[in-house]
């Protein structure tokens, strides 16, 4: 059963650069241990710090464990993919944008990789805030990686008040791992 779930995981998220992750090679073993100690619940997780510290690989490993071993529904997506989906009207999303946001809001575990690297627009910002709000109300965890924290993350948003609201919700709903 485990090998079938692992195959499903790889088919669902695609073969990625992170499939070769070796926990012994993670540059920040303390962050890896803390993240892998996370258990499903309403409190999410935000992995933050400089580039090259293994945040994305740690998130990948955690999501794989949650899907394969603990059998949670997991959606792993890069922030850039989410932003592109909100910005590109020429490539309609199956179920429309409302359906896409509903799916992201309801999945058991939503993992957003590299928040702050996407090209933002107000449509994306409001959509991301809406998804965070829905997940908090539903008490579903959101797992995030980013190179930015606090004011530096807020500065990445076009609308400062929306950026402040997003950062506030992340602080309230996610445990930080540096």
Image (cartoon, rainbow, N blue to C red):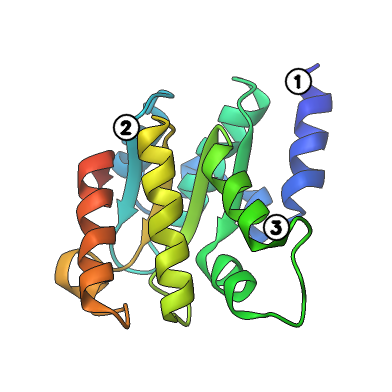
Q: Residue at x 21, y 48 (%)?
A: 171
Judged left or right of residue 98, residue 148 is left
Quarter holding residue 48: bottom left
Q: Nearer the viewer, residue 133 or 58?
A: 133
Say above or below: 26 vs 80: above
Say above or below: 92 vs 57: below
Label located before the other in sequence (2 or 3) = 3
Mark 3 sits on what residue? 16
Judged left or right of residue 141, residue 86 is right
Q: Position of residue 61 (x, y in %)?
A: 55, 40
Dot 3: few (<14), some (14–19), or many (≥20) neighbours within 10 Å? few
Disc assigned to residue 43: 2
The nearer-to-camera label among 2 and 3 is 2
Mark 1 sits on what residue? 2
C-alpha span from label 1 to label 2: 26 Å
Q: Residue at x 51, y 48 (%)?
A: 111
Say above or below: 156 vs 54: below
Q: Secondary structure at mark 2?
A: loop
Q: Position of residue 177 (x, y in %)?
A: 27, 45
């Amino acid at each position: 059963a485990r090998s079938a779930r692992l195959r499903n995981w790889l088919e669902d998220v695609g073969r990625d650069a992170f499939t070769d992750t070796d926990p012994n090679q993670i540059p920040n073993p303390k962050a890896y241990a803390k993240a892998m100690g996370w258990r499903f619940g309403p409190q999410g997780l935000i992995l933050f710090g400089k580039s090259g510290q293994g945040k994305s690989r740690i998130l990948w490993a955690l999501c794989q464990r949650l899907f394969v071993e603990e059998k949670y529904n997991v959606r792993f997506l890069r922030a850039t993919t989410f932003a592109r989906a909100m910005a590109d009207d020429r490539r309609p999303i199956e179920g429309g944008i409302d359906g896409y946001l509903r799916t992201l809001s309801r999945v058991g575990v939503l993992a957003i990789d590299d928040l702050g690297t996407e090209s933002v627009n107000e449509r994306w910002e409001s959509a991301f805030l809406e998804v965070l709000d829905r997940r908090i109300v539903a008490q579903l965890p959101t797992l995030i990686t980013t190179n930015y924290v606090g004011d530096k993350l807020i500065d990445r948003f076009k609308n400062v008040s929306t950026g402040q609201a997003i950062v506030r919700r992340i602080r309230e709903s996610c445990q930080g791992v540096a």
